[in-house]
Amino acid sequence: MTTIGFHVPMWSTVRNAVLGVVFTNTTAPAAFLRLLFHDCQIQGCDASIQLDSKALKGNSEIASGMNSGIRKLETIHHTKYNLGKCPRHVSYADTIALAAKVSVALSGGPNIQIPLGRKDSPISSRQAADVIISPPNITVEARTLGGGHCINIVDSLFDRQSDDPINPGFKAMLRLLCPTRKPLMNLTIVPNDKTPLAFDNHYYKDVFFWGKASSLLIQGCP
């Protein structure tokens, strides 16, 4: 693999593409970071998540319910097309990784230097995604950037349990954000912490403050 410092045109193209999206959608950085996270879980960071579901007759990672809500693939495709004008071959896998890197930096996180030279996978498996990726209603799910959906936590909010571990004050706050057991749509966003658009450690500060309450916290699907 080669390092990012040798490919300024590549870096600039990805950064400009991400900036263009962030100006109109402040949740985009979280979406790019989640895209990389889900891609890397199955076969490594190989862009298998972006393979066309129709061409694979539905047997692709992106067709899995575990990848519901994955966004910004169209931006990756457009950016990859522009990167094709560079003198060297640029993979989809590198494009996804660079978009996530840029997103973290734009959100106040570290400007991480990452290696390049990833190869794109020719195969993708819906079954693998179904098994390996954690479900959206997992009990403990840490998130540094982004938010979650009410539909993933309403069962915990509305089921009465004698040994309910959720802090009452925290639960009341969440029920204000998610007032019905059946959300009208899967678009209701619940912030993971006080700064859902910033890459910081407020999530962990909230866990410390609320104690067991934050064991409820939600998969980040901004």
Image (cartoon, grey):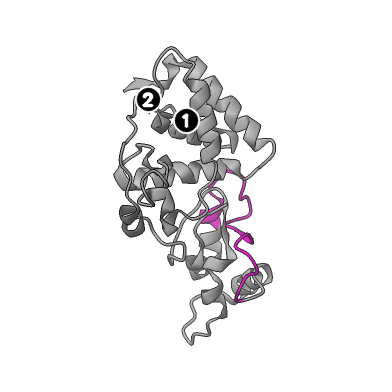
Is residue 129 magenta-colored? no
Residue occupying the point 36% across, 43% down: 40
Q: Secondary structure at mark 2?
A: strand
* Amino acid type, residue under disc 1 in the picture: Leu
Q: Position of residue 188 (x, y in %)?
A: 64, 61
Above-or-below relation of 131 to 176: above
| Image point (61%, 50%), residue name | 196
Q: Is residue 198 above or below residue 114?
A: below
x and y percentages locating residue 109 in the rendered image: 54, 37
Which badge, 2 or 1, is on the more N-terminal residue?
Answer: 1
Circle 2 crowding by C-alpha within 10 Å: few under 14, some 14–19, many from 20: many
Camera sees residue 158: yes
Label ID, residue 98? 1
Q: Residues within 10 Å of mark 1 (few under 14, many from 20)?
A: many
Determine the main secondary structure of the stretch shown in magenta: loop
Is label 2 in contact with label 1 (beta carbons under 8 Å)? yes
Q: Residue furthest top?
A: 87
Q: Which kind of residue does numbered mark 2 sit on?
A: Leu
Residue occupied by mark 2: 116
Residues rendered magenta in the picture: 181-205
**Image location (x, y in percent) of residue 33:** 49, 42
Tell me, yes or no, if residue 109 can be seen here.
no
Can you say which quadrant of the picture contains the N terminus?
top left
- Note whether 43 is above or below 117 in the view shown: below
Q: What's the distance in space between the residues labelled 2 and 1, CA to CA?
A: 9 Å
